[in-house]
Image (cartoon, rainbow, N blue to C red):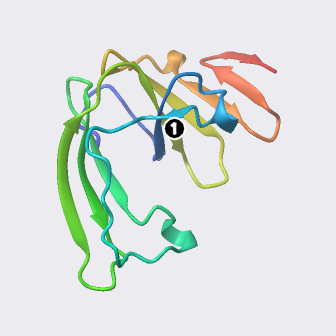
Amino acid sequence: MNKHPRVKLRGLHLYGVVRGDIRANNGWGQRYEFLKPPQPPKDVPRCSALWRGYTATFQLDSDGELELMSYRYPLTLTKAKTEPVNEKLSGDFWLVMKHNFFGPRTYVPFKDGRIVDDESEWVTEEPRQRRIRRGSEERE
């Protein structure tokens, strides 16, 4: 959910939250460690459609802070469960976003827990060409 008046995500979907060097770990950086990690019920089956066994809901507030609102466990063998979290993310981190599963990644930076709303600071990687584009600058 995006409540920020100046940030337009234009169809980008969140694929991960990472810290550190976004070039590390094949472009997935270091995983952001949440204070309250997900706790899927024991009866959550594994499948390729939802390998983690849960979805997370985030909200970008109007002041630029990102909050992990909840985890949802839709594939339980009993009733789907939603677990409230309400955790504000802190420090420097990146959102890994894509238009679709096979598309290029767009890395949206956060500094001191707030989004960098200047899109020229966002980084797009086009995996097939292995090129990195930061704003209007492109390099191999």
Residue 98: image location, x then y, percent: 55, 45
Judge whether 25 appears above or below 64 on screen. below
Which residue position is annotated with label 1?
A: 96
Q: Amino acid at mark 1?
A: Val
Q: Nearer the viewer, residue 104 or 28?
A: 28
Residue 64: image location, x then y, percent: 26, 24
- Residue at point 29%, 63% (across, down): 72
Q: Nearer the viewer, residue 123 or 82?
A: 82
Residue 106: image location, x then y, percent: 56, 34
Judge whether 88 appears above or below 58 on screen. above
Q: Which quadrant is home to the C terminus?
A: top right
Instruction: Choose top left, top right, bottom left or bottom right for residue 110.
Output: top left
Instruction: Choose top left, top right, bottom left or bottom right for residue 83.
Output: bottom left
Q: Residues within 10 Å of mark 1 (few under 14, many from 20)?
A: many
Judge whether 69 appears above or below 66 on screen. below
Residue 122: image location, x then y, percent: 53, 23
